[in-house]
Amino acid sequence: MRFLDTNVLLYSISSDRGESAKRNIAVGLLAERDNALSVQVLQEFYVQATRPTRQDALPHEIAVALMRTWRRFPIQEITVPVMDNALNIKAVFGLSYWDAAIVAAARALGCRELLSEDFSHGRAIEGVTIFNPFR
């Protein structure tokens, strides 16, 4: 299973012509079955996708419908053990808490890959290797 970061979800809805290649990659990734997400990723998607200052902001109803569709993937909930692991990852690897929480969620689901453009491509953290699918 591969864990998808928020940027994959956001690129899948982008109407920016400059992001069309990334949108196509994201849509392709979301069509696959071996993905996983977390509650945090879905929350971040909602906040960013519906942000009033976003050029192509989604209405609440569409954002929620997409989030429900993506619930077909395994979703890691925010739990005390995930939070504790995130705090440890933050301390050891120097990530922000929120990035550490993404890695902790991926790890909790047993994902060996995290797809994101927000981390260093090829970096391994706690058995999770980060890949930037948009490179």
Image: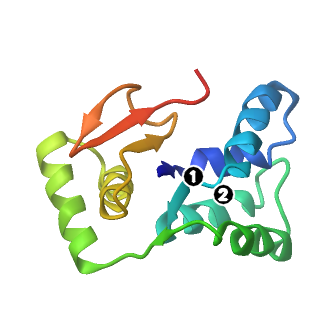
Q: Which residue is mark 2?
A: 48
Determine the residue positioned at 77% across, 51% down.
Answer: 54
Which residue appears at 56% of the width and 53% of the height? Answer: 34
Residue 6: assigned label: 1
Q: Is residue 95 left or right of residue 16?
A: left
Give x and y (percent) for residue 71: 63, 72
Q: What residue do we see at 33% from left, 52% from top?
A: 103
Q: Left or right? Give the position of 102 relative to 20.
A: left
For the residues marked 1 and 2, what is the alpha-carbon distance in whole angstroms? 9 Å
Helix, strand or loop under label 1? helix
Type of the residue with mark 1: Thr
| Above or below 130: residue 127 | below
Percent coordinates x, y for residue 66 in the rendering = 76, 67
Residue 89 % position (x, y): 19, 51
Residue furthest to the top? 135
At label 1, counting other C-alpha atoms closer than 10 Å, the crowd grade (few under 14, some 14-19, many 20 or more) is: many
On-image quarter of the C terminus: top right
Residue 12 vs residue 96, the one in the foreground: 12
Colouring scheme applied when the structure was drawn:
rainbow
Is there CB contact under 8 Å for labels 1 and 2? yes
- Residue visible at 69% across and 70% down in the picture: 67
Considering depth in this image, is 37 or 97 the residue closer to the camera? Answer: 37
Type of amino acid under label 2: Gln
Nearest the camera: 107 or 33?
33
> Sequence order check: which comes first, mark 1 or mark 2?
1
How would you rate the neighbour count of disc 2 (Cα within 10 Å): few for under 14, some for 14-19, many for 20 or more?
Answer: some
